[in-house]
């Protein structure tokens, strides 16, 4: 018995992590104290996040990113457009062309070089005002001539306004009862035929350089655009009888030809963007139309083969009013 007691006393104690170590009963709440509570692990939604608190990017980086979004082409031009002062002058699509339609009185100056004894020249003799008998008693009336124009705006020097090359064409026609070839001997007999009608038609064309001073509405916010045009002119003309055939002179020549000359126009345009800025921008986004205008202008043309003797003169000094769009 003493020997057994001595051996038990001398045996070393097993370490706690040994498999031979005695299993100790766990105290209540010990595991809960060792592991953190789920309520403590949950993040506070109002707690500041140090990773989210970053300094804002520098202005140069923001500008570089904005220019990258715009694309590599025309970045400076779009930046200038973005900074324009007049809000209604800003547009998104590029401006390259213009179309205009106008109406005005037109009377070809055919009798300009006439120096005969009769008070009325050949054109006024046929198409002038007449009395009941058909005798000419006044100059011809102006006819309303429609004109359609197109411009290619290829350059804008210092953003003063577009410099363009414009092409325009008009159409005019006048008609009157034909004069008898042999005047009647009866002083009260009519001088014109009731059945035969003679007509004169002209198509004036012009190729002009155009400049529009659009810096006024773009920078100052005043919706007025003065402009000027100048260049070559050419008019096609013909005359027909009542049977729709070309008239002929005493020598048998057909009444058909063309005349060269020059033409200048000066006018002013009222930009209509200020009436509804929102609609103007929507129109630009959907159709590419940048601006719309109403305008009036003065026109001076000398279409007489540059003053050559015996040439027909189809020019005139007149005015026009119309509508225009830029796109």
Image: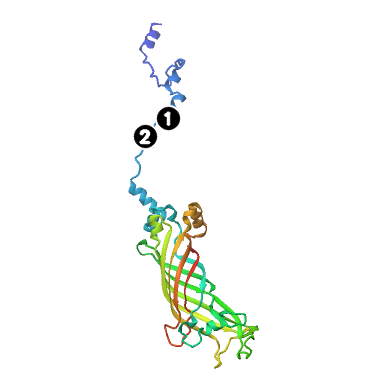
Task: Examine the rendered structure and indicate whether residue 321 appears above or below residue 110.
Answer: above
Camera-side residue of 153 and 174: 174
Camera-side mark, 1 or 2: 1
When the figure is inspected, residue 258 is found, relative to residue 73, above or below; the finding is: below
Q: Left or right: 254 with respect to 37?
A: right
Q: Can residue 303 be seen in this view?
A: yes
Residue 146: x percent and y percent? 53, 71
Judged from this view, the residue extending furthest toward the bottom is 251
- Give the residue displayed 45% in from the left and 72% down from the top: 299
- Colouring rule applied to residues: rainbow
Q: Is mark 2 on a helix, strand or loop?
A: loop
Question: Residue 174 shows which numbered tag?
Answer: none
| Viewer can see residue 72 | no
Calculate the distance from the C-alpha at mark 1 to the C-alpha at mark 2: 12 Å
> Picture quarter containing residue 248?
bottom right
Residue 317, percent from left and from top? 46, 74
Answer with the quarter of the image where residue 304 lies.
bottom left
From the viewer's perspective, is residue 101 above or below residue 82?
Answer: below
Q: Quadrant of residue 163?
A: bottom left
Q: Residue furthest front?
A: 187
Horizontal side, residue 156 vs residue 322: left or right:
left
Q: Residues within 10 Å of mark 1 (few under 14, many from 20)?
A: few
Q: Are marks 1 and 2 in contact (CB under 8 Å)?
A: no
Residue found at the far right of this picture: 195
Q: Which mark is residue 50?
A: 2
Quarter the N terminus occupies: top left
Left or right for 147, reference 75:
right
Other residues around mark 2 within 10 Å, as few (<14) / some (14–19) / many (≥20):
few
The residue singled out by tag 1 in the image is 46
Near-viewer residue (12 or 289): 289
């Amino acid at each position: 018995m003493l020997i057994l007691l001595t051996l038990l006393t001398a045996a070393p104690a097993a370490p706690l992590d040994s498999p031979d170590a005695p299993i100790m009963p766990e105290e209540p709440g010990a595991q809960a104290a060792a592991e953190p509570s789920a309520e403590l692990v949950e993040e506070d939604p109002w707690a500041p996040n140090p990773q989210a608190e970053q300094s804002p990017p520098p202005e140069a980086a923001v500008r570089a990113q904005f220019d990258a979004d715009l694309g590599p082409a025309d970045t400076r031009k779009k930046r200038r457009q973005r900074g324009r002062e007049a809000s209604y002058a800003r547009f998104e699509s590029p401006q390259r062309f213009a179309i205009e339609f106008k109406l005005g009185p037109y009377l070809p100056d055919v009798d300009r070089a006439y120096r005969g004894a009769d008070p009325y020249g050949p054109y006024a003799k046929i198409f002038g005002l007449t009395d009941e008998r058909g005798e000419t008693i006044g100059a011809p009336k102006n006819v309303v001539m429609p004109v359609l124009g197109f411009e290619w705006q290829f350059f804008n020097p210092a953003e003063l306004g577009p410099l363009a090359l414009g092409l325009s064409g008009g159409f005019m026609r006048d008609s009157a009862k034909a004069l008898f070839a042999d005047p009647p001997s009866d002083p009260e007999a009519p001088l014109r035929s009731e059945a035969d009608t003679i007509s004169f038609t002209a198509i004036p064309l012009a190729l002009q350089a155009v400049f529009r001073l659009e810096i006024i509405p773009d920078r100052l916010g005043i919706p007025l655009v003065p402009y000027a045009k100048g260049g070559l002119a050419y008019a096609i003309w013909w005359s027909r009888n009542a049977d729709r055939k070309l008239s002929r002179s005493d020598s048998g020549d057909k009444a058909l030809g063309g005349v060269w000359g020059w033409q200048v126009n000066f006018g002013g345009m009222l930009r209509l963007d200020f009436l509804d800025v929102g609609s103007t921008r929507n129109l630009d986004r959907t159709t590419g139309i940048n601006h719309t205008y109403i305008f009036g202008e003065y026109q001076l043309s000398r279409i007489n083969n540059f003053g050559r003797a015996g040439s027909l003169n189809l020019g005139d000094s007149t005015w026009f009013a119309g509508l225009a769009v830029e796109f």
